[in-house]
Amino acid sequence: MRSTRGSGAGWARVRDRIFRDADGRVVVGQRPNPAITAWAVLTGVRPVADVDADADALLGGMATGALVVWALDELLRGATVFRRVLGAGVLAYQLVAVAGSLR
């Protein structure tokens, strides 16, 4: 017969390790930092900006750059494992997208 003792406690430890910072606070979202704010503004401006293709490409490149900076910041300094994994995933996605657009 299999014991179920401790199985809930094991998940709680994993959950705490992923979502809690060094001070024990649950940290999933935080106040936006400048890089993610720049990405959001640039991404929001592009569809409504009345600019030529070169300026649109520049805005897109700046938005991508801001998102890469945010992802690197999260990967290196994220408060929780969740935030670091999120940064790694966004960074990997952006690198694949940029590599694909260079072909």
Image (cartoon, helix red, strand yellow):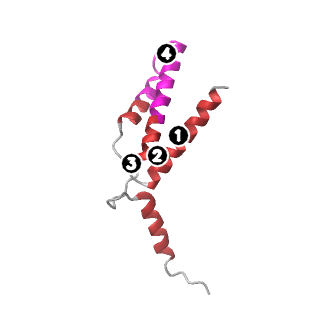
* Residue 21 located left or right of residue 90: left
Tell me how far mark 2 sits from mark 3, CA to CA.
15 Å
Sequence order check: which comes first, mark 2 or mark 3? Answer: 3
Report whether residue 47 is seen. no
Residue highlighted by disc 3: 29
Residue sitting at 52 percent across and 45 percent down? 88
* Residue 96 located left or right of residue 60: right
- Name the element at disc 3: loop
The kind of residue on which mark 3 rests is Gly
For the N terminus, the quadrant is bottom right
Q: Do residues under tags 1 and 2 come within 8 Å of each other at their CB atoms?
A: yes
The kind of residue on which mark 2 rests is Leu
Q: Position of residue 7 (x, y in %)?
A: 51, 75
Sequence order check: which comes first, mark 1 or mark 2? Answer: 2
Give the label on residue 91, or none.
Answer: 1
- What's drawn in magenta, residue-wise? 41-68
Residue sitting at 47 percent across and 34 percent down? 67
Residue sitting at 47 percent across and 14 percent down? 50
Residue highlighted by disc 2: 75
Q: Decide: is 100 above or below 28.
A: above
Tell me how far mark 1 sits from mark 4, CA to CA.
24 Å
